[in-house]
Every structure is written in C-alpha cells, then in structure tokens.
Amino acid sequence: QVQLVESGGGVVQPGRSLRLSCAASGFTFSSYGMHWVRQAPGKGLEWVAVIWYDGSNKYYADSVKGRFTISRDNSKNTLYLQMNSLRAEDTAVYYCARVASIAAPLDAFDIWGQGTMVTVSS
Amino acid sequence: EIVLTQSPGTLSLSPGERATLSCRASQSVSSSYLAWYQQKPGQAPRLLIYGASSRATGIPDRFSGSGSGTDFTLTISRLEPEDFAVYYCQQYGSSPPVFTFGPGTKVDIK
C-alpha cells in the first residue's frame, strides 16, 4: 500500500545537526513532489519545505531558510531533511507528505507519514 | 503573506449535530488552492477536502467544503463519534510557493 515512513528523529543539543529520512513505498516516488511539515508539542501544523518531483526546485519556510535543506534520492525512493544549527524552537514532530497530483507542485498533501519526533535540548 | 484564521477555536457539539467550521484568509485565495485536513490525537493529518470543495478519496459525503475568495467553510452534516478531532485549513499558492496552515478548530464532544 501507499506508505511514507519517517526516521532519524531524536534528542539533539542546540546548534547541532540531524538528518531525517522518509522512505516511500507503494507509488512511483519520482513522479510526486514532497513536503516536510512539523508540529510542535500541543501546537498546529507548520509547513517546512517542498521539493519538486524531479528535485529541480526547493522552497523553505522563512523559519528554517538557510538552516534546513530538503533533498531526495529517487533511486532510493527516499526524501531527506538535513537540519543544521538546530534551535529549541525546532522541537516538533516532523512529517513528510506527498503532493496529491503527479508532477504538480501546487496541490494538497494526500499521503502523510506517521512522523518522527525531534527534540532540541541541552 | 496570506494569513489564515479559523473560527471558532473550539466547537462543542453532540453526535448527530451539524458542524460548521470557518476559515478566513487575509487576502483572496484561489479556490483551487484551499484544503482541509483532520487530525486526531497521536495521528498524522488526513486530507479531507481539496480545491475548496472536492472530497479526497475515501472521505464520507457528510464532509463538504465551500467558499471562495477569503471565506471558506467546512461542514460536517451529522457528527459521528470518529469526527471529533482538530481540523486545519490550508492554502497553497505560488510566486513563491507557500503552503500556509490555519491554527485549527477543535471539535469536541459536548
């Protein structure tokens, strides 16, 4: 079945780095744009970053621009989020999500992973 | 930057009642680019409505979306026990691409 599985979360000190992964299965990963969305404990959803289906374009929320990098390896059906210079306010559950339409950058998010928790604390 | 406001913050209703959730945008949003999601505790969000009024795959017809411009509505015609959750609206626009979520409306049991 169509599935996204995140991994790589954990506890990290402020200023350090962490890389999240999102393994896709059950669909043609290389045909879909992908997003990262985060949710701080008890808070709402915050969009983090998007990457086009072919990796040709990437966009970021202002809150993470210059610190986070989204990438993908279509040969491995995997999405990544490299998070550098982490701050306490980056503490959240991080979800990967699929764009609903093939090769369409602007659409709703139809498939979500279960999320991975990132805690930034000394 | 478009800001989404959702009201009410919390909606207390009984099963079988009708729920009307509002999402207001600070600027006009293309109806093609407005979505609604449901999130239950400990779970990932689930897409309910896209393009302001189209139901996603597998979504019951008691869920409906409407609206245009700056005012959008999610209606649940008759609340089922499994519908008590938090609902988020989202707009996705271009130039540059942004994907803004509203703060959410919690629908809880009265």
Image (cartoon, coloured by chain):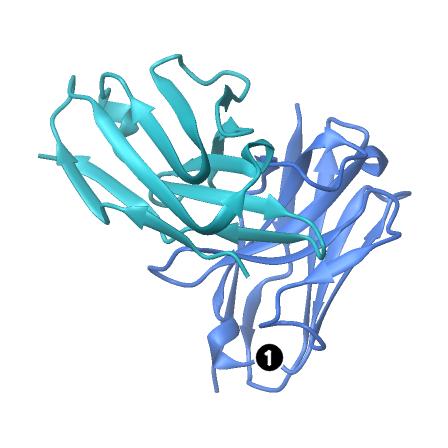
The chain painted blue is A
Q: In this view, does B72 lie above or below A36?
A: above
- Which element is circle 1 on? loop
Answer with left or right where residue B6 lies relative to residue A103.
Answer: left
| Residue at x-position 44% and y-position 36% | B37
| Residue at x-position 11% and y-position 26% | B14
Classify mark 1: residues with Cα within 10 Å, few (<14), some (14-19) or many (20+): many
Residue B101 place in picture, x, y as percent? 47, 51
Taking depth in this image into account, of A42 and A57 the one nearest to the observer is A57
Q: Quadrant of residue B39?
A: top left
Under mark 1, the amino acid is Leu
Chain B hue?
A: cyan
| Residue at x-position 41% and y-position 26% | B66
Residue B94 place in picture, x, y as percent? 69, 49
Q: Quadrant of residue B1?
A: bottom right
Answer with left or right where residue A67 lies relative to residue A108.
Answer: right
